Image (spheres, rainbow, N blue to C red):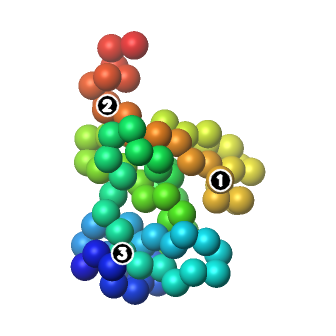
């Protein structure tokens, strides 16, 4: 449930185990909505920014450095909007 402590995202109903910094405890959080900051889905169990809600895509900098440093954040965008451009 939202707000409960977690070790990995699979433990959360929302699918996002979130922490605000490297030293903070991770808690289940809601997924990012359209125009909110997000992380691409990762192999790591904990996010600094949650992935997007269903139907949204995280438009982020997908570099190796970004994924290692957990700084590959982006913005949630509607999949239909990106198809038009």
Q: Quadrant of the C terminus?
A: top left
Do tag 2 and tag 3 residues touch (Cβ < 8 Å)?
no
In this view, which residue lies farthest toward the top?
Answer: 85
Residue that badge 1 annotates:
71
2 or 3: tag closer to the N-terminus: 3
Res 43 seen here: no
Specify whether 6 is left or right of 65: left
- Label 2 secondary element: helix
- Alpha-carbon span between mark 2 and mark 1: 23 Å
2 or 1: tag closer to the N-terminus: 1
Is 57 or 29 nearer to us in this picture? 29
The structure residue drawn at horizontal position 46% and vertical position 83%, both measured from the top left corner, is: 7
Do tag 3 and tag 1 residues touch (Cβ < 8 Å)?
no
In the depicted structure, whether residue 3 falls above or below residue 69: below
The structure residue drawn at horizontal position 50% and vertical position 65%, both measured from the top left corner, is: 47
3 or 1: tag closer to the N-terminus: 3
Residue that badge 2 annotates:
79
């Amino acid at each position: 449930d939202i707000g409960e402590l977690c070790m990995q995202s699979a433990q959360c109903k929302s699918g996002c185990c979130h922490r605000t910094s490297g030293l903070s405890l991770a808690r289940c959080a809601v997924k990012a909505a359209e125009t909110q900051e997000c992380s691409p889905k990762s192999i790591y169990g904990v996010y600094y920014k949650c992935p997007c809600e269903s139907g949204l895509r995280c438009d982020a900098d997908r570099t190796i450095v970004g994924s290692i440093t957990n700084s590959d954040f982006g913005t949630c965008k509607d999949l239909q909007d990106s198809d038009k451009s």
